Amino acid sequence: MSTFQVNLRDVIYSLSDALDLVGVTHIHHGKRVAYMAVECAKVLGWAPERLDQLFQAGMLHDSGVSRTYIHRRLTQFEWEGEAEHCRIGAELLRSCPSLAPLADIVLHHHTHWSTLQGLPLSDEVKLAANCIYLVDRTDILTLAALKDQSNILYGREDTRQAIAARRGDWFCPELVDAFLQASASEAFWFSLESEQVRGYAHEWIAHDRVRDVPFAELRSLVRIFSVIVDAKSPFTREHSEGVARLSRALGERLGLSERRCEMLELAGLLHDLGKLRVPDELLDKPGRLTPEEYAVMKRHSFDTYSILRTIHGLEDVALWAAQHHERVDGSGYPYHLGGELSIEARIVAVADVFQALVQTRPYRAGLSPDQVMEIVHEHADRGALDAAVVAVLDAKLSVFWALAAPAATRASSLK
């Protein structure tokens, strides 16, 4: 099993960027929350290790949000059912060993301080969760106060008073006092502007180093990306996992090295990351997309690359993931690369088409193996998909079908 030289903070930053896409216009929320939380904790003299964990939790606190209609609710100061995205996010983080320590913080980042006091959690977790809650609501109040104003200072005193009014009930008194001290300066608020908060996050990344990360650890972190994007629509659950399994298996059959096959698996998990920007109603639409809607959809592979390209050590993975809608004859998008496509990009493209046809989508039921291969062959015959890769599918169709099909489909179709 290979190791990859990556800065894990690069990966976490990119995951925060991906979560930003769900908000469409509500950009850098996680980074602002991380910044404000750390500034408040610095007032209280928290140790560097606690500050680092708090920053990560702030960046990823909304990892349980995939759908745009849920994200719209987050802009309300309080709403029924707000704890659900906390639960989903905590379960997701708990599945990744390197992020599991953040799970309880994320689980309770909408829990009132008066309730937290009675829970069997460490004081450190309670304070971190409540700190995230306090600054998360601060960000929502700040954006609501801004409206059409361009000056970030507009409404800041109203925001500070709203937080102070919930001292002791919603928020820990010690944290409220720290927030009021930290937010007394204009610099605190100016630092919330996009350019400033991105710079703050990049400084955090720079304090870590590139290290050897085992494939299993990296995959568990990358899988979080895939689960978030596949949860975007009930029709795409397991899609990225299926493409990842197919891509790796195709690479192995074609004689690629173990490391290249592992990279193909990562590319499969990450290929649809840009779909987080696509509105829910387009992914769930039962009919054909209009030209305008299709233009929105075609952006997702480009957004995938925009998010992943800054992760040092995964440059090739980012390219293969972003090129999954490219075609050998140049008819794909967004780059129209044609014959320049690497064998890895061709593999991911075939795996994506195959798995999508196997799955039920809002406009059709999942297809049988023969129906799937008839369509795949049509693509290969006209020069869109790589014929050599498609031939590998043909040679072991039952094996690849089992890798691509959701569990329920496999049980009913391959007895």
Image (cartoon, rainbow, N blue to C red):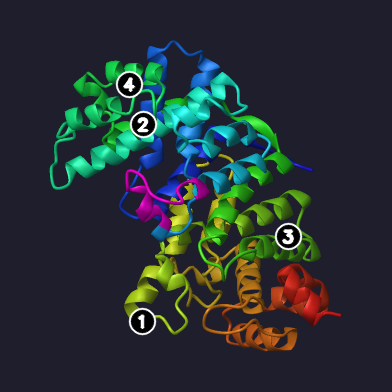
CA gap between label 3 and label 1 equals 34 Å
Q: Magenta residues, as a range?
A: 70-84
Residue behind mark 4: 179
Question: Reading the chain from its start, which is encountered first: label 2 or label 1?
Answer: 2
- Image: 375 above or below 337: below
Q: Give SS at disc 4.
A: helix
Few, some or many residues within 10 Å of mark 1 (<14, 14–19, 20+): few
Q: Residue at point 39% right, 36% down? A: 31
Question: Reading the chain from its start, which is encountered first: label 3 or label 1?
Answer: 3
CA gap between label 2 and label 1 equals 40 Å
Q: Is residue 243 visible?
A: yes
Left or right of residue 250, residue 190 in this image: left
Residue 329: % across, % down: 53, 78
Total marks in image: 4
Few, some or many residues within 10 Å of mark 3 (<14, 14–19, 20+): many
What type is the residue that disc 1 sits on? Thr
Q: Nearer the viewer, mark 2 or mark 3?
A: 2
Question: Reading the chain from its start, which is encountered first: label 3 or label 4?
Answer: 4
Question: Reading the chain from its start, which is encountered first: label 2 or label 4?
Answer: 2
What type is the residue that disc 2 sits on? Val
CA gap between label 2 and label 4 equals 8 Å
Residue behind mark 1: 290
Single out the residue that lies furthest toward the right.
415
Residue 55: % across, % down: 47, 28
Residue 93: % across, % down: 61, 41
Number of the label disc, if any, that sits on residue 135: 2
Q: Residue at point 58% right, 42% down? A: 90
Residue behind mark 3: 248
CA gap between label 2 and label 3 equals 42 Å
Q: Is residue 358 shown in magenta?
A: no
